[in-house]
Every structure is written in structure tokens, then in C-alpha cells.
Amino acid sequence: MPFGLFYFGPRGFAQYTQLYVSPVVSQRLTLRGHYLFHFFHNSHSSASENNYMYYVYILHSQKDKCLYTGYTTNLKKRFDDHNNLFVKSTKTRAPLELIYYEAYVSKKDALSREIFLKSGRGKSYLKKQLSNYFFTNPWKC
């Protein structure tokens, strides 16, 4: 999938390039030590017709120290819903902290990733990926 990227080159000048990267999108990409900020080219995208990004996210309950995994198309609204007690499954576990998310252009990919992150191997992956966070903020279940 093509991404147009603006980044600051070695002399501090903004530069533009186009890269092909996997559907997993992070907030910042690193290329040769420079932080890149991505911009989507919807005209080149073969994503769904509605051009949504699908987010898989992990919340950590400050109350019972358990994790919650979910997916959404509007991460900020969904996170606010969780903390404002509008979500039945996390109503008794607030306050919640957003500790991890991934963005996908395909709903199928996001749902597959959500299922994986809920599995035993997925939990092991998260334990390694977020080892520094879990060192200071342990989780139970």
C-alpha cells in the first residue's frame, strides 16, 4: 500500500517520498533514524469503499489490573465511551488506560488481529511488546 511521507532530512529540510508498507500503520515510522509522519493517499488506496481505518486496541484497567482488547473505527470516541461507563463489559473496571493500538485498512485484518491478541500467543506477544510498561504496571488476567 502506498504512503506519502513527509520527513525531515539530515539537514533539517522537509522532504517528501512515497513508500510501500504493510497495512499495519504506526503513528511514527522510522527511516534511517528520522521520524516520518504519514499521510494517506486515498486515491491510490485499495482499502474499503468507506476509507475507514480499523483500530485494534488494548486497555488496561487501573482498578482490577486486567486487559481489555477491542476494535473500532473511531478510537477516541470508543476510548471515551469506555471511560464514561457506556460500555457494558468495562463499566465496572474504570478507569481504563489506552496502552496499545494498531491501525488497519481492512476490517477482516483488524478482526483477525483482535482474535489473535486475545489468544495465549497474543498475550505473550503483548507481554514482550510492552515489557517496559508491564514492568511498572503489572497485569493479572
Image: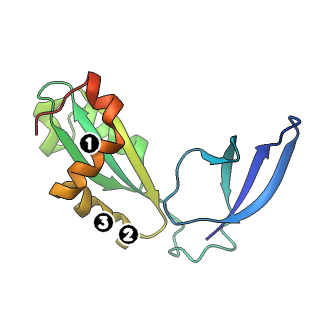
Counting residues from the start of the chain, the first of labels 1 and 2 encountered is 2
Residue at screen point 28% across, 22% down: 136
Q: Which mark is residue 109?
A: 2
Kindly identify the amino acid type of the residue bearing the numbered disc 1. Answer: Lys
Q: CA distance from mark 1 to mark 2?
A: 21 Å
| Disc 1: which residue | 127
Q: Residue 8, image x and y in percent? A: 80, 40
Whether tag 3 and tag 2 are in contact, CB under 8 A, the answer is: yes
Q: Left or right: where does residue 34 sit relative to residue 48?
A: right
Q: CA distance from mark 3 to mark 1?
A: 20 Å
Q: Left or right: where does residue 80 sit relative to residue 50?
A: left
Q: Which mark is residue 116?
A: none
Kindly identify the amino acid type of the residue bearing the numbered disc 2. Answer: Asp
Q: Secondary structure at mark 1?
A: helix
Whether tag 3 and tag 1 are in contact, CB under 8 A, the answer is: no
Q: Classify the position of the C terminus by image quarter.
A: top left
- Disc nearest the viewer among 3 and 1: 1
